[in-house]
Amino acid sequence: MYIKVTPRYFPDGTVFISVGLTRGRHDSVLKWPFPHKIRLEILDHSSEQSRQGHRSRIWDPSTLCSEYFWGRPKLTGEPDNPECVGLSIPRQIFFVKLPVVIAHPSRSARYLWNGNITVKLTVYL
């Protein structure tokens, strides 16, 4: 699988994070089309009591898009399967500040840690 981040997906600067399938060495033993539900999430680095992570809904490949997106990726010469699902996040969300009490030099914003975001992909087996 791969995760693709598009920083300015819409003119307003919305960030779009999507997921798709890519070929791998164990493709021959996996079940196709891809059968597992998935979820994307941007992790909040606040204390547990005040976390407000941004999560997608749980996507079920059997009900979204076609086998073109969830089928076994081609062996060679073809690009990865295109993305079918994603999570849109307003750009300003990344700059929401942590409360001063728990602020730390590397963690001054809820969703940024040393200038980076953490994206979590959950695959429900």
Image (spheres, helix red, strand yellow):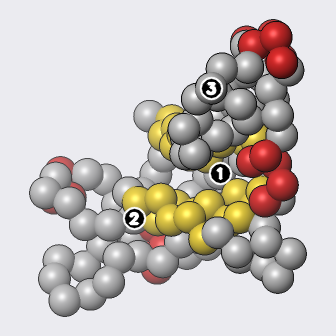
Assign a secondary structure to mark 1: loop
Q: Residues under labels 2 and 1: Cα distance?
A: 14 Å
Amino acid on which the number 3 mark rests in the picture? Pro
Assign a secondary structure to mark 3: loop
Amino acid on which the number 1 mark rests in the picture? Trp
Q: Please name whichever residue, 89 or 81, is drawn nearer the observer in this view of the structure.
A: 89
Check the picture and name the quadrant holding the C terminus. Answer: top left
Q: Please name whichever residue, 48 or 72, is drawn nearer the observer in this view of the structure.
A: 48
Which numbered disc, 1 or 3, marks the residue that appears first in the sequence?
1
Which numbered disc, 3 or 2, marks the residue that appears first in the sequence?
2
Assign a secondary structure to mark 2: loop
Q: Hey, which quadrant is residue 32 in on the image?
A: bottom left
Measured as percent of width and height from the top left, residue 57 is found at 74, 46
Measured as percent of width and height from the top left, residue 16 is found at 68, 65
Which numbered disc, 2 or 1, marks the residue that appears first in the sequence?
2
Mark whose residue sits in front, 3 or 2: 3
Residue corresponding to mark 2 = 21
Q: Which residue sits at x=70%, y=74%? A: 8
Residue corresponding to mark 3 = 105
Q: Which residue sits at x=20%, y=60%? A: 24
Residue corresponding to mark 1 = 59
Q: Residues under labels 1 and 3: Cα distance?
A: 36 Å
